[in-house]
Amino acid sequence: MGLTEYIVMRELNYPDINSFAGYRRVGGWDAYAAALKTKTPADIVQVVKDAGLRGRGGAGFPTGVKWSFLPRGVFPRYLLCNCDESEPGTFNNHQIIDRNPHQLIEGVALSAFAIESSTAYIYMRGEFAAAAITLERAIADAYRAGFLGKNILGTGYDLDIYVHRGAGAYICGEETALMESLEGKIGQPRLKPPFPAVAGLYGKPTIINNVETLANVPLIVERGVDWYRSHGTEKSPGTKCFSLSGHVNRPGNYELPFGVPLRELIESPEYGGGMRGGRPVKVIIPGGASAPWLTAKHLDTPLDYESVAAAGSMLGSGAVIVLDDSVKAPHLAYKMDEFFKHESCGKCTPCREGTHWLVKVLHRMAEDGHGEPDDIQTLHGIYTQMAGNCFCLLGESAVMPIKSALQLFAEEFEAVIAASGHTIEQGNGRHTIALAPSKPSRGRFG
Ligand SMILES: Cc1cc2nc3c(=O)[nH]c(=O)nc-3n(C[C@H](O)[C@H](O)[C@H](O)COP(=O)(O)O)c2cc1C
Ligand code: SF4
């Protein structure tokens, strides 16, 4: 199911695409130049809509549909490219910038033209210092060639692109916290509605898209809807850069058509190359730390938004974390929730307190090896009070690891309790709690 021609990881076809001259040699910036001269912004929105491009930042929301939510006649408008990329297991945005930066800049420029914006910001994760320099150089190349600035190519269209580095907070990838941070405020989420398309950066209509989403746009515009839709599935068209990590032999980014079976990604010698030391798969987290866990019985699940949801999880950012049987569930839940506790911005009580108490109990169980008789009930009580009650999806995401761990591997928590000298009886363990979905949670990214 591999690709002969890549859409985003095009350095695999054209090794010098990371230079401006190399990008121009493969037709880079031609789609943009032609669009400015021969197409209207509405034409570009329509082609992206018809291609079925879906946001790669987590929710898979249709990009062209999002663009058409902008209120008519309200200016200025802003385009924000989200390169905060802090979700554990997700590392493809960084690679796109490193190896194919000009395509991202052209994608930002085409998308800004489509939404009639003259100012775009690329919000970078604070730690991506070298990547920020790479982008700034690529932007400077585009200015020098006349693709950015004032009256571009004599068409009357103006566009400036700025790179902004955050200070290294996961919450600043959440779109409203990102805007707060960009405005120079503390990076904490805003209440929605209003949604950014209506009142976003500086209170103006704003579109926020992920790096991989925007990097798809030049080839969609250049080659058209049918070509794009010849990849992937009907509802998840195109390709996805899967970030594969964990106990596989060949971790890395693999661009494959949506719908590739999980087993192929993990086992194919061209991709994951199978499990390290031939050990069995125990847990698969198919969409970054925020996604519910799957197990070996899900290995034949096609990797598209609908199929992964039907299997009980979410494709999220496409970060596929695969763990073998050397990992204990309480330890895994502890490490995941420790991340969410650390990154909780503290604005709302269910997340601030909930992550604190989850980690306190999980640390004692997983790291100190000490269990109390009612630990399972306590953990269940904490996460059910968080689910559906957090101000933003970071808190909702923190529910996923512990909920998955208890649903799938309750006996490992019981073993810690038993090893501490307590008897698991009716009333002090999982037997009294419904290890089933409690309150419906809203999923990972909105
Ligand atoms: C806690 C949190 C962190 C997020 N981090 C990122 C991120 O690093 N990159 C990203 O593109 N989207 C991230 N998102 C999703 C964004 O809020 C937003 O939905 C996305 O950038 C939209 O882009 P898309 O439509 O192209 O997917 C995050 C969401 C949450 C709740
Ligand atoms: S859920 Fe967590 S990260 Fe989101 S606002 Fe509340 S405290 Fe902040």
Image (spheres, grey):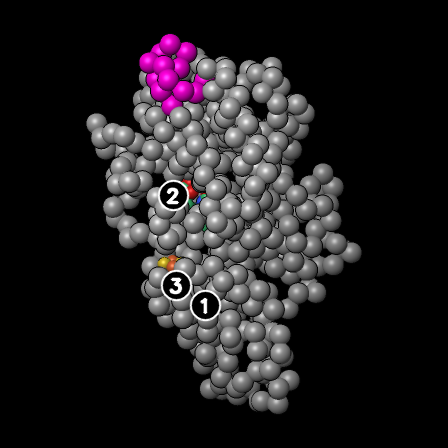
Task: Please say whether residue 229 is visible from this viewpoint.
Answer: no
Under mark 2, the amino acid is Leu
Q: Is mark 3 within 8 Å of ligand 2?
A: yes
Q: Which residues are magenta?
A: 147-159
Earlier-in-chain disc, 3 versus 1 = 3
Q: Residues within 10 Å of mark 3 (few under 14, many from 20)?
A: some
Q: Give coordinates of residue 231: x percent, y percent.
A: 53, 30
- The residue located at (63%, 40%) in the rendering is 253
Q: Which residue is mark 3?
A: 346
Q: Which residue is mark 1?
A: 355
Q: Which residue is mark 2?
A: 182
Main SS, magenta region, reads loop
Q: Is residue 186 above or below residue 408?
A: above
- The residue located at (57%, 78%) in the rendering is 364
Q: Quadrant of the N terminus?
A: top right
Q: Give coordinates of residue 65: x percent, y percent.
A: 34, 34
Q: What is the distance, in whole Å, between disc 2 and disc 1 at their CAs?
A: 26 Å
